[in-house]
Image (tube, grey):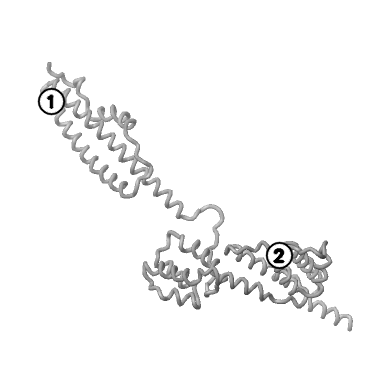
Amino acid sequence: MPIGDGEEPKSLLTVSKVKESHRARAKSESSVPSKSENPSRSKTATLLKSTSTSLGDKVEKEYETCSEVVASQNCKDKITVMQSKYDDCYTVYERCAASLNEIIEDSRAQQSVQSSNLTPSQGGCRLPPVECEVFNGDYVQWPTFRDLFSAIYIRNPRLSEVEKLFHLNAKASGEAKSIVALSPLTIDGFESAWRNLQNRFENKRLLVNSQLKILFNLPSVAQECGKSLKHLESTIQGCLTALQLARVETTNWDCLLVFLCSSKLPKLNLALWEQSLLSKSEIPLWAEFQAFLKDRHRTLEAIEEFKPNASVQSRALRADNS
């Protein structure tokens, strides 16, 4: 039966209608890719999407041409077969396109998250840059320098190996600088320089000896002063902390620490310490002596605030003499 003017066969669908009828089904049936896509797979997906789009355009043009020819011949069997083949092909095409779009969008989302993690926050306060002190080869300062340099420079993903070596050379002096200078300013140079520093200063025995040297050579407090008592107490506590970090057991050092510290105090402080003891025969704890020193230097600091300075006293004397 011939086709009338302006009449379209019911069994023959246009390209746009076929696309509309299968887009929803292809989207629901498309497989969702894994969330751990790598950048290389994303680039491949983009290339495949471009290629498939170009092929899809060619297929649509050929389908339109064939549709016009078959419709003019009024061959219902050929129309049904052709439409069925195009229907299957377009369903597969939509499913692949949906999968490629998922991979590309997921990769862009991951790149956006990574870039936001590297970019400093625009809101809130802006913190000043952190700097570590120059390391001159002192065993006591090595743990602090090691941890600060690692946090600021080594773990910084924006710095290359050459830049890390440049900063290491700038933050070293004396013996440490001479060790760093042995490594060339290349990509492999930083790992060599940092390993040489660790081999030289990562010495637990020398670190402990350095702390013991400080502990057994404490300066004497010639005159009662709040700052001097505070410095004495903080020096001993710093040595204890460093020894504990080096896995040295100091739990039973109370009598030793109290004796070392009390021998550096003036007589007035010793007398006050003895008066504060509830039991004169028991061995006092370092925590008790530490509490006494803190209480004493706070008292002295409060008293010193009310003392007139030398210029005020001299003006008062001149006023009295006049």
Task: Give the amino acid type for the residue marked by disc 1 in the picture.
Answer: Val
Residue 82 position in % (x across, y down): 16, 26
User: Which residue is most to the bottom?
Assistant: 321
Query: Looking at this view, is 36 or 222 the one in front?
Result: 222
Q: Earlier in the sequence, mark 2 or mark 1?
A: 1
**In this figure, which residue is indicated by the disc labeled 2?**
254
In the picture, measured across the screen, residue 203 lies left or right of residue 7, that is right
- Quarter holding the N terminus? top left
Check the image and report above or below for 123 versus 264. above
Residue 317 lies, in percent from the top left, at 86, 81
Q: Kindly identify the residue that appears in the image at 43 percent across and 59 percent down.
A: 157
Q: Secondary structure at mark 1?
A: helix
The residue wearing badge 1 is 70
Number of numbered callouts drawn: 2
Mark 2 Cα within 10 Å, few/some/many (few <14, many 20+)?
A: some
Q: Is residue 227 visible?
A: no
Specify the label residue 49 is tagged with. none
* Element at label 2: helix
The answer to which of 320 and 25 lies nearer the viewer is 25
- Residue in the image at 16% along x and 34% along y: 62
The residue at the far top in this view is 1
> In the picture, residue 84 is in which quadrant?
top left
Please tell me how crowded label 1 is: few (under 14), some (14-19), or many (20+) other residues with Cα within 10 Å: some
Q: Is residue 300 left or right of 152 when viewed as pictured?
A: right
Disc 2 residue type?
Asp
**Taking the image as drawn, is residue 315 in sight?**
yes
| Residue at horizontal 31 percent and vertical 47 percent from the top | 41
